[in-house]
Amino acid sequence: QTNQSVTVTVLDVNEPPVSNSKSVDINEDAALNTRVTDIKCSDPDASDTSFKFSIDSGNVGSKFTLTMATTASANIALVDILDYENVNEYQLRIGIFDSVDNKAVISVFIIVNDVNERPSFSTSSKSIVSISENAAGNTNVGEPFQANDVDKGDRITYKLISLSTDIDSNNFFYKIGR
């Protein structure tokens, strides 16, 4: 029986970058260019110190952009207004590439927080109207208008506010409906 030596050479393989998925939230009324979150990565290969980032999917309506912050991190920023009532969650798939284009993919979940918006009013009516001093009771003042509130569950209430001290708002009434 003879013994024979065998030499095994292990070659290093370039591994993809490493990063973690995350979940963040943002108010629907956040200002444009608000930084939503950052993405950081590393690489098991010491020679890989510079990375490229991309939003691969999930950017419904192109609401977000991704910009480099350092060679190993990027920022996600808001570039279009959000609307909780239409889309209240985004799942961005972020691609991260190392120097030899090995790719890692992470998810960034962006939860949109609802903010109570003001009701909107129809624009067909004037906001300042006049009526004769001796007008008969039950005389309509101005044109009918309509209010709308996009927030679910909100109830619209009306109140006559007088800016003049000679007008008693108790002498006026308003009718809701047609």
Image: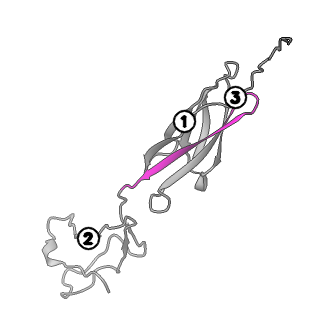
Residue under label 1, please give it: 20
Q: Which percent across, then down, holds residue 163?
A: 21, 63
- Colour logic: one colour
Query: Quick one: label 3 or label 2, which is nearer the N terminus?
Result: 3
Reading the image, the residue beneath label 2 is 157
- Closer to the camera: disc 1 or disc 3? 3
In the rendered structure, which amino acid carries the disc numbered 1? Asn
Question: At x 25% / y 82%, what residue is drawn?
Answer: 175
User: Where 165 falls versus 134 (above or below)?
Assistant: above
The crowd level at tag 1 (other Cα within 10 Å; few <14, some 14-19, many 20+) is few
Q: Residue at x 83, y 11 (%)?
A: 5
Query: Which of pointers 2 and 1 lies earlier in the amino acid sequence?
Result: 1
Residue 47 or 9: which is nearer the viewer? Answer: 9
| Residue 148: % across, % down | 38, 71
Horizontal side of 68 relative to 120 (left or right) equals right
Foreground mark, 3 or 2, reads 3
Q: Secondary structure at mark 3?
A: loop
Label 3, residues with CA under 10 Å away: few <14, some 14-19, many ≥20 = some
User: What residue does disc 3 label?
Assistant: 15
Task: Give 19 or 89, whichever is nearer the viewer.
Answer: 19
Three-letter code for the amino acid on which mark 2 is drawn: Thr
As measured in the structure, the alpha-carbon distance from the residue carrying label 2 to the one carrying label 1 is: 47 Å
Distance from disc 1 to disc 3, alpha carbons, whole Å, reads 16 Å
